[in-house]
Image (cartoon, rainbow, N blue to C red):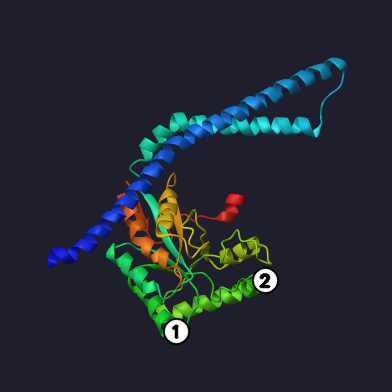
Amino acid sequence: MADIDSRPRQAKRRKRVQIIKKIIICMIVTAILLPTVLSIVLAVKLSDARKQIDELEASIAIGAATGTEDSSPAAEEVAQTSIFVTSQLEESTRTGEEGRIEEITEDTEKIKIYLTFDDGPSSNTAAILDILNQYDVKATFFVVGKTDDSSRQAYRRIVDEGHTLAMHSYSHRYHEIYQSVESFSSDLTRLQEFLYEETGIWCTYCRFPGGSSNTVSNVDMQELITYLDEQNITYFDWNIASGDAVSGALSVEQIVENCLAGVSGKRTGIMLLHDAAEKHSTVEALPYIIEGLLAMENVQILPISDDTVPVRHMEALH
């Protein structure tokens, strides 16, 4: 009887292993082919740029002989293109020739991955916490303000089980939060004080609704960032997207692939997932994501802390 009961679990386990194997193989192939393709593309660009430079130099030589000089925008563009393409090719060459040495010296360093869940608590929070507990993995929850008994219990359970409780906004209403610095401050302070009353934790980590690079804010995001700095609040964006924010109907396999493929080439990866009532596929994908990460060499899954290096979209844009 015990053997019969174990068959569904074994089949499920085999299915997980097969999915993880396929994803890891895709990641390996991508890691092998991408540098080669990039080098070819850059080499072609460099060849074109050099031809343009040769033509420009010939033009300059003619101009010098005739007492004229080419200071047109086109000439400046050619020069800037040359500098950019050359620097990119040199960087690619260094990565190809010296990257292996750097990888070897850093091979013993842990790749730090942070699982983060936005928008909770929800009816799925308990299931997410159960899965994290099953694998003894800690995560970070960027929560909103909810006063029902189930949500209050979820806040406390997040803290009690060693996860990081962080702020997303109280209302999550973009048109209200992003009206002004004052409206943003009022909303965030309300959440910060509410969570302190519920858990005894004074939260100092947050994530902007839509990220720091959102395009819906009526106020300059840099002003909001300055406000957070003044309040000693650290904000975090993400550099690995599960894709579950785009579509609630995204398949389990696609979510897993997005998450595991996103780890490639990163020393620090902050993974965006969502804790919402309609995100059932995210909950189903979570065990596969965790098992895939744990199967990778030197990967460490951590909750956000003061030691975490923030990923920030605004800084990347500048």
Residue at the (58%, 50%) spot, across then down: 316
Residue extending furthest left?
1
- 105 vs 249, nearest the viewer: 249
What amino acid type should be assigned to the residue bearing mark 1?
Asp
Residue 35 makes an appearance in the image: yes
Describe the element under mark 1 as helix, strand or loop: loop
Disc 2: which residue: 180
Q: Nearer the viewer, mark 1 or mark 2?
A: 1
Q: Earlier in the sequence, mark 1 or mark 2?
A: 1
Residue extending furthest top?
65
Residue at the (59%, 32%) spot, across then down: 87
Q: Measured from the top left, where is residue 190 in percent x and y?
A: 54, 78
Q: Measured from the top left, where is residue 179 in percent x and y?
A: 67, 72
Disc number placed over residue 253 in the picture, else none: none
Residue at the (49%, 58%) spot, across then down: 243
Residue 305 makes an appearance in the image: no
How many C-alpha atoms fall within 10 Å of the one at disc 1: few (<14), some, or many (≥20)?
A: few
Q: Would you say the residues marked 1 and 2 are in contact, meaning their CB atoms lie under 8 Å apart?
A: no
Q: Measured from the top left, where is residue 285 in percent x and y?
A: 38, 61
Q: Is residue 133 above or below residue 75?
A: below
Q: Measured from the top left, where is residue 85 in percent x and y?
A: 62, 32
**What is the quadrant of the N terminus in the image?**
bottom left
Q: Is residue 307 above or below residue 102?
A: below
Disc 1: which residue: 148
Q: Residue 5 appears in which quarter of the rendering?
A: bottom left
What amino acid type should be assigned to the residue bearing mark 2?
Ser
Describe the element under mark 2 as helix, strand or loop: loop
Q: CA distance from mark 1 to mark 2?
A: 29 Å
